[in-house]
Image: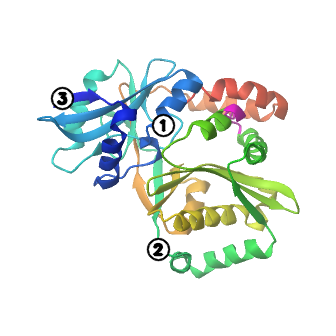
Amino acid sequence: MEIRKVNIDKDFEEWNDIIINSPDFYTIAHNPSLLSFLDNFLGWKGESFFIEKESKVVAVYQHTFTSDSKVVSMPHFSYGGIIRKNDQFSKQEIFKALSKFFPNQFEIREFEPYSKHYDTDKIATFLNLEKTVKEQLAIFKSNHRRKIKKAYKNELEVEISNSKEAILSFYEVYSKNMLRLGSPPLSIKFFNNLSNEYKFGEIKIFVVRYENQVIGGAVVLSYNNFVEDCWLSTLSEYNNLYSSVLLYWEMIKYSIEIEAKYFSFGRSTKDSSLLHFKKQWNPIERQLYFSFSEPQKVSLKKMTFLTKIWKLLPLKIANFVGPKIADKLY
């Protein structure tokens, strides 16, 4: 197999044609505009490739070199990996050809492993969307449909836009939630720049209000016929109003209205409360493999300690210090 670097300005039509018609499941992370965004914002060099056999493209793939010179497909997004034109060649064959472009360290997030060192802690969930909102609603259990109705009865309001004001409203909830969870937040500049630089699809900010107060929000990206909830946060003290249920339902409705075929809930940790919540939507579940070039050494005790310390920080300090850490994580 031969490997050819892609010039997206010239090759996008061929790239996109393979993505759309592939037997493999693609995602937001296969949108090539994300490489230029990460490059411009973080200085991470991205590369897109055509994998060819006898001068014919058989697969596409893209990754980013992070600040520690590791190849990751794809950082800051749920998963990436190889997308084949057809099933003539296995992904393992294609990965072997690609690996000569990798440095000593790599991390590939995909639906199959590419190394003997891999984690299986994450699950991807998504919906095959129905053609109408009415048909989509009908596939949910009656108890779940009642929760959606209750959210509307609670007089929650949802705004959909891509304005700077909407990003700020989302970020206020997101940063509070990240502090509650004990994790550093991405910077608001990250989201503003993403909004400005995202191409070949749409970015929408969903904001939910109760009595004119913002109590939740989400950042949603679309690419071809695929829509993904990439970031979502709600204030826990308003959970009894079903704000998260309403946010997801409005995102699903939006996806159907723009004639998408798939809505992705992103990835979740196995056996987590978040995964349990997502299962209420009757999604398809797929195992994710995080393949590494070498064994990962993570101290659970140390991570637990740092999480406890972070939760004690004042919000202003967490929002000032946190992005300096989180923007460079992946």
Towards the viewer: 129 or 160: 160
Neighbour tally class for label 2: few under 14, some 14-19, many 20 plus, Cα within 10 Å: few
Residue appearing at x 50%, y 22% in the figure = 44
Residue occupied by mark 1: 33
Badge 3 amino acid: Glu
Image: 54 above or below 112: above
Image: 317 above or below 61: above
Residue bounds of the magenta highlight: 182-189
- Quadrant where the image shows the N terminus: top left
Badge 2 amino acid: Lys
Looking at marks 1 and 2 on the same chain, the residue that comes earlier in the sequence is marked by 1
User: Marks 3 and 1, how far apart in space?
Assistant: 24 Å
Residues at circles 3 and 2 in contact by the CB criterion of under 8 Å:
no
Residue appearing at x 62%, y 31% in the figure = 303
User: Marks 3 and 2, how far apart in space?
Assistant: 40 Å
Residue occupied by mark 3: 2
